[in-house]
Image (spheres, helix red, strand yellow):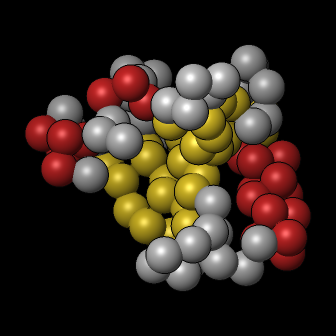
Amino acid sequence: MRKLDVDLMTAMVTRSGDSEAGAIYLKLNFLNGECRVLNRTYGEDGARLWSSATGDAPVDEAHADDYLQRQINFDPDCWIVEIEDPGERFSPDDLVA
């Protein structure tokens, strides 16, 4: 979150899950009514990576929120971090795993 602050992007934990378990989701809010949701997964080699849970194209915010609510219902231990990114500059590759 410090890296995002340096890049003048606001990030906030909007849902705290279990400190040792639970999925992590990033909601990228472009502040124009569109969002993307990323979830942390693992590659074939076991490396952590981020994938788009809502597809390659942005979706409307209501769709993103519905998706996240379904995930909360499935995994009440999940974490959600919302990142305000009106310039669509955020890259999950910048995050420390």
Residue 50 vs residue 48, the one in the foreground: 48
The part of the image, by quadrant, that contains residue 58 is top right
Most extreme residue toward the left is 6
Taking the image as shown, residue 1 lies to the left or right of residue 65, namely left
Percent from the top left, x then y, of residue 57?
Answer: 74, 19
Is residue 34 visible in the rendered image? The answer is: no
Percent from the top left, x then y, of residue 79?
Answer: 56, 67
Residue 17 vs residue 2, the one in the foreground: 17
Residue 77 vs residue 6, the one in the foreground: 77
Give the residue drawn at x 49%, y 54%: 82
Give the residue drawn at x 37%, y 42%: 97
Taking the image as shown, residue 30 lies to the left or right of residue 10, namely right
Give the number of marks: 0
Is residue 47 visible in the rendered image? The answer is: yes
Taking the image as shown, residue 69 lies to the left or right of residue 96, namely right
Give the residue drawn at x 85%, y 75%: 73
